[in-house]
Every structure is written in structure tokens, then in C-alpha cells.
Amino acid sequence: MRCRACGAATRPTARFCDQCGSQLPDARTGSARPATIATAGEPGDRRIVTALFADLVDYVRLVAEHDPEDVRRRVDAALMAMVEAIEAFDGTREKFIGDAIFAVFGWPRAHDDDALRAAHCALAIREALARVEAPPIGDPLQVRIGLATGEVVAAPRGNDGESDWSLTGPAVTTAARIQGIAEPGEILLDEATLRAARRVFDVEDRGLQLLRGQTRPIRVARLLGQAGFQPWHPPTGRLIGRETERDRLRERLLGLADGRGGTVVVEGDAGMGKSRLLAELAADARSAGLNVSWVDNVSYGAQEPYRFGRALAQAVADEHGTDSGSMARRLVFTPDAPAEGAREWAGAIAAMARDAAFSGWEEEAPLVPAEPAAVAQAIRRLAVRYTERLIEVSGPRVIVIDDFHWLDPSSSSMVDELVRMTARVPLLVLIGTRAGEPPPVPSLERAERISLSGLDLDDTRRLAAATLGGVVEPADARRLHDRTAGNPLFITETVRAILDDPTPGAGRRLVLDPAMPRTGAPITLRALLGARIDALADDAKTVIRVAAVVGVAFAEAVVAEVLEQGVDRAVYARLAEASLIVPLEASGQWRFRHPLIHDTAYGGLLGSTRRVLHARVADLLEAPSGRGGIGVVARHRLAAGDVERALPLLVEAAEESLALGATAEAASFWTTAADLVGAAPEAEAYRRRAREALDAIPAAGPPPT
């Protein structure tokens, strides 16, 4: 069992987590209250999760045809196999429902690859059930599985906040409905899950399906299995921006062709295009006749010993159409290999083969070092021998290590040896990693580094137009750049979300509303950024969400007053180190790194909590010492649901804006006031004032002389 508050593994009989001290679920009911960061209103939050429903096939028939004790024993084994698969990918088993199980990935702790974890888990469940012992009651068990990704509300069932927690939202019901239409042995995904997992799995489109109880059909896909080893392939179309960085990497390829190795670390925030840039260079290397090996690291594999080493060996074996064990045998054991070295290498391979795909080594390894340090050293020397022989046989090579920040610790020594080898053999090591604390590989301290930042305005417009397949107006490009800070992933996902908008007028024209709702970030980005916020300590998580209510820019003093307690300056320093906020010139003033982070932090709050916090902010701004403009106060009153106090403020803000010549702002305030009163008689008067304000906007042209 894992702690729902911090995700740490727990002792079977423990009542509280050894890691964070949180109360653990009751062993019988599975219920407990995880830590909450709510600062006002009801406890709980909103988040993006992937829900998984798995239902055993023919349970009723088994009960009717076989001894209930045998059926119960077999079903218990199947359910425990499911739980093991869920925990292996850091999911949360929510409940058993008879012969079915409901699990969620992304709660209580989010990861930026929860949909991917859920898909892997579904495959693991199907494989595990095939191994559950069949006799004496018939054929192997089969399962139907449905996966869906979307927003849920996580909140306690009891009013006192002490009951077990429930998840409510479309993702939960959709996963259950999708599972209901699956055939025995099938795993079905909704479109949001498919988008997150598309480059890792083989799928089959099942078209639009109208699910029971829903009014609009959704697109469903069948998960066939993992796609096997595939390097990251860039999307269609040319790489936009990054010309300078690509030229620098191409120079290293030219050096490799001349026999000069090296190491380059490409670093940057998630979504900056590290994988895309490395994939472009890998394509260049293959075009030049160079050998390329690509290894993806994954978050759920960070605790799997020597995962990187095994993945690299399998990638090389795939190039030669063989298995990793046979390839290693061919490379390592040569007639001139010293006998002592051969025994050590065989022992090292046998040690790795205990839970790896290496095959046929046990007979070669009568002696496996007993000391852990000796095993590690033997594996390290094996990595050197293997790589040297690989280059000797096949020539200069590029090894791409992507998502290096998730490298398993035991493989650090292997990477260290690879980097050191680049000084004496034609080997180019390219590493893609997020900014932050890297894995401990001493030799990387001297490696060349390329840091990726956001695209400029022109490249943002070009990338948006390429994604859209249409024209992007300068004003919309600027709004998009301001909203995404030029992050390529954020740009493309925002444009795709607009393309998916079913409202009239959307389509091959970018329409980016300046007043886009704060919760309007695409699901993919809310999952990615939500995981970064979820990884924060509780105090930092509280501060960033309260700050999101204050605005994109905020003051430490205002946050402290809203919280009604002081905040350690170190909290803001940690948020800045996490690249979530940046300081402004004035002391104690900050802003979110870009609006999508702000939107995600704001979207994680329950509506009741938002309303309470907005009311507190409005009270502070209206106080004698407050410095909030009328329009800002009006927006906070409106968000707090205080219509009676918001309406006169909106009218006053409209008049003030008009007096200052800010006609567009005045029209916006009038329109909001009209929407607020609905069918009341004054609504038409407000709308007329809005039209008059818009008509007063001067045409674009040269300034008067």
C-alpha cells in the first residue's frame, strides 16, 4: 500500500506514514483523509487524472458453474494482481466493485505522465491475469478495461472532512462507460488519454461512440500494446526556431564523422522542444550514415535497477534484428578476450539478467560477485567493454539519452563511463534534460551545454500557423506569446485546444480571447503543470494557489493578508527555483512565469474556495490602505459571487474607463454588467453603452499632428 498524501510505500500494519506522518487508509475499508491544502471553503481540489476501470469477464457464469470457494480464491488472486500493477505505476486503487476495480492516476499526487502510466498499467493487468492459475475452473481470466482522462473534483464524502475521499467528474464516468463497451480482453481509451500516450503505444481507432447516459459521442481507441522501441519522431513539418542550436549540434556531427567524440547536454523546461531538437539531429546523423541509439527514460522507471543499460542494449539489438543477450554475446566474447575479464563480464550480465531481457547468460556466469560494490564495478566495466566493441564493429555512434532527469540511479556510473569514453573513441553522447538538479554523473560537469528558452514572437506566430494550418493575426500571435512565454508545447497544445472547440467560428482561424477563462488551459498542459505544482511542499502549494487568485502579478504582503498569516520568504525562493514565478523590480512583488502556470494553479482550487479567497482579496483592496483599482475590485467581487456589490463597481469602472479614453475596457465592463443582470430592464441600457463605447474606438492610423 502507498500513502495517499506523499506516495511513499508503507508497512502493512502501519496506521501513519513513516515518510510524512499522514493517516493511512484502514486496511479493511481503504478510507482515510489525505493531506489537504485548502485555505478556505471546502477541503479538496480540482485536478486532471486518468481513471481506470477493469472488470473481470464472466464472473457471474463462474459463480454459477463452479464451487464458490474456488471462484473466490481465483478472483482474489486476480484482484491482487490488479492492485500490484496499479501500485507498480504509482496509481491509487480507489475501490473494489464486486469483481471490478476502479483506480486513478494523478491523485493524490500528480505526475506529468499519468495517462501513460495508466496505459502501461492496463497492459500489465491484462498480462498478469493471463498468468493467474486456471485450474480447476476453466480458461484463463479475461478483463475489460476502460481509460479516460479529464478533470475531477477530489473531496471528502463527510462534512467533517474526516471521511474517505471521493473523485467526481467526467473522466470517472467515461472510463466506466468505455469499459462497458469493451470486448473481453480489450483495453479502450478516450481521446484525451490517447493524445497523451500516442507515441508509445500501438492503437486502433474505434471511431465515435455514444456512451450510455451521455449526449455527445466521443472518439474511442483500442490499445493494442506497446509500440516497441521507437526513437522520438518529430511531427510533420520543419523545425521552427532553434536554428542556432541545431547548427551547433551539426558541428558536433561533423566532428564525429572525423573521429572526434563529445558530449552535449540540451536543457530546458518541459515543453521547450528538447526531444524535438534531438530527434532532428538524430535524423541528420542517420542521413550522414552514422549509427544512432536512442534511449527514453521514464519517471516510473527511475527505481528500476539498470533500466537505462538494458534499454540501450535492447536498442542496439533492435538495430541488428536480434535480442539483447545474443548481441551482447557477439560483442563481448571474442577469441582474444582475457579469461578473467570474460568471467567478470558474464557475471555482470547475469546480475542484470535477474530482472531484464538479457537471455542465455546463466551458463556463462558460474561466479557472480557477492559484494554489491563488486557487482556495480563489474557492470561498469562491462559497459565500457560493450561500447568499445560496438564502435569497433559498427563505427562512430550517436547515443541520445532523453529525459535524463529520470535516469535510474544505478545507471549513473554507466553514463559516466560513456561520457569519459567520448574523449578517446568516436562517440557523441547527446543528453536531453530538464533544468534543475541533474543525476550525479561527475563527468558531465565539463560537457557542452545548450539551454533552450521560449521562442520569440515571430517564431511563436510561425509555429501557431503551422499547427493551425491557417493564418494567425499579429494581435492573436502576441496574446499567444504572452500566454505561453514562447514554450513550443504550450503553443501547439493551446492552438489544438482552439481547433477542437466546437463553437461556430472556430476552425482554421486562431481566435484567442483576451478574456479566456483562467481554467481554460488544455487538459494536457493542466496535467503537465499540475504535476509541477503537486510536487511542491504544502506551504508552497498553498501560496501559489492563493497568489493565483490575487492575479498574474501579486505582492507577498497581499498573499500574507489573504492567508491571515506570514509566509517565509524561502517559500517564494523555492517557487522561483521551480520556474513557476519570477521576481519583479519592486521588492516583494512577483508574477507567474507565464499565464498558463497561473491558470493551472487557479484551476486547482474548488469553486467554493475561489469565492472565499476572491472576497478576501476584494476586502483588502477596498480597505483604506488598499490600492486596488475599481475594475480590479469589481472583478474580484464578481468572482466571489457577490453580484449585489459587483454590479455598481462594474458600472463605476466603465464610467471611469470611458473618462480616461479607454473605450474598449469600458465596453467590456458594460457588457459584463449586462450579462450579470440578465433579463432585467437595465441590461439593454448597459449593452447600448457598450456599443457606444466600441463605436468610439478610433480607427488605426498615424497619430494626429
Image (cartoon, rainbow, N blue to C red):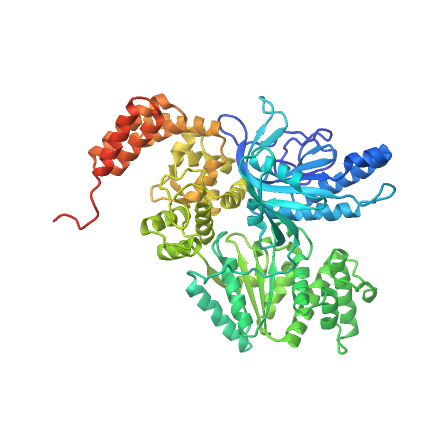
Query: Is 306 left, or right, of 279 in this rendering?
Result: right
Q: Look at the picture and state if 214 lies above or below 413.
A: above
As rendered, which of 583 and 308 lies closer to the eye?
308
Q: Residue at x 52, y 60 (%)?
A: 234
Q: How many marks?
A: 0
Percent from the top left, x then y, of residue 552? 39, 40
The answer, for residue 681, to whether it is visible in the render is: yes
Of 255 and 689, the residue lying toward us: 689
**514 and 415: which one is in front?**
514
Left or right of 623, for residue 269: right
Residue 287 position in % (x across, y down):
53, 72
Q: Is residue 388 above or below residue 113?
A: below
Q: Position of residue 593 (x, y in %)?
A: 42, 46
Q: Residue furthest left?
A: 705
Within the image, what quadrant is residue 657 found in?
top left
Question: Picture quarter containing residue 591?
Answer: top left
For the point 74% across and 49% down, the residue is 127
The residue lying toward the viewer, choosing from 50 and 88, is 50
The answer to whether 675 is drawn above or below residue 312 in the figure is above
The reply to whether residue 92 is in sight is no
* Quarter occupied by the N terminus: top right
Q: Position of residue 276 (x, y in %)?
A: 50, 59
